[in-house]
Amino acid sequence: MWYSSIMLRELVEPLYRSLVTPYRAARGLFIDERKAERLPISLPVRYRISLIDRCLEGQTQTVDLSSGGVQIAIKEMVSPGTACQTALTLPAEPEALSFEGHIAWCRVARGVARERYEAGIAFAAPSSYTDPGVARLSRFIAVSLLTRHLG
């Protein structure tokens, strides 16, 4: 049976990613595939991660932030794909912004004792892009990035 190159690529690409990407990451050759630029900023954030038998809750600071997600420090290792909720407090905002999402990745924090972990949380796509919370977050990130890049 003859397959087109597109069909073969669709079949092989997931296998390639599952085998090669961990190898590159382990060798320090991690390729950043993020879709949005990260804003390195420390903001207060509350999180609630829904584990099978309980909820992991806490309050911490962001490491970085983008329109698609946030990186935070947490107390336990959590599996990617685990559902979570975040409440992010922006400067000069009276009310925290709430976002649903899932753990995209989790690892032992670099250069820190083993009781601290870093986690990337991917925000779920909003049900409506007219949501005021999404608009406030987008405006904050845009202004912050412009200020950072333009001086």
Image: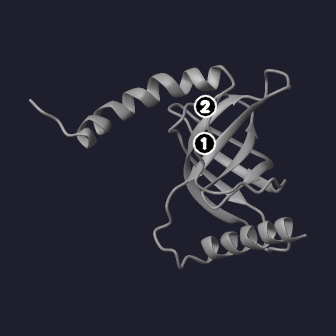
- For badge 2, the amino acid type reads Val
The span from disc 2 to disc 1 (Cα, nearest Å) is: 9 Å
What's the mark number on residue 76?
none
Badge 2 vs badge 1, beta-carbon distance below 8 Å: yes
- In the picture, the quarter occupied by the N terminus is top left
Question: Which element carries disc 1, helix, strand or loop?
Answer: strand
Few, some or many residues within 10 Å of mark 2 (<14, 14–19, 20+): many
The disc, 2 or 1, on the residue closer to the chain's N-terminal end is 1
In the image, residue 9 sits, relative to residue 41, either above or below, namely above
Q: Position of residue 132 (x, y in %)?
A: 61, 78
- In the picture, the quarter occupied by the C terminus is bottom right
For residue 22, what is the image quadrant? top right
In the image, residue 113 sits, relative to residue 6, either above or below, namely above
Q: Is residue 15 left or right of residue 49?
A: left
The image shows a total of numbered marks equal to: 2
For marks 2 and 1, give the one nearer the viewer.
2
Q: Position of residue 111 (x, y in %)?
A: 85, 25
Few, some or many residues within 10 Å of mark 1 (<14, 14–19, 20+): many
Q: Is residue 32 left or right of residue 40?
A: left
- At 56% across and 76% down in the image, what residue appears? 131
Which colour scheme appears in the figure?
A: one colour
Q: Is residue 130 left or right of residue 107?
A: left
What's the mark number on residue 78?
2
Residue pointed to by mark 1: 49
Q: Is residue 131 left or right of residue 46?
A: left
Q: Position of residue 116 (x, y in %)?
A: 78, 29
For residue 57, what is the image quadrant? top right
- For badge 1, the amino acid type reads Ile
Q: Position of residue 49 (x, y in %)?
A: 60, 42
Question: Which element carries disc 2, helix, strand or loop?
Answer: loop
Q: Of 142 and 58, which appears nearest the observer?
A: 142
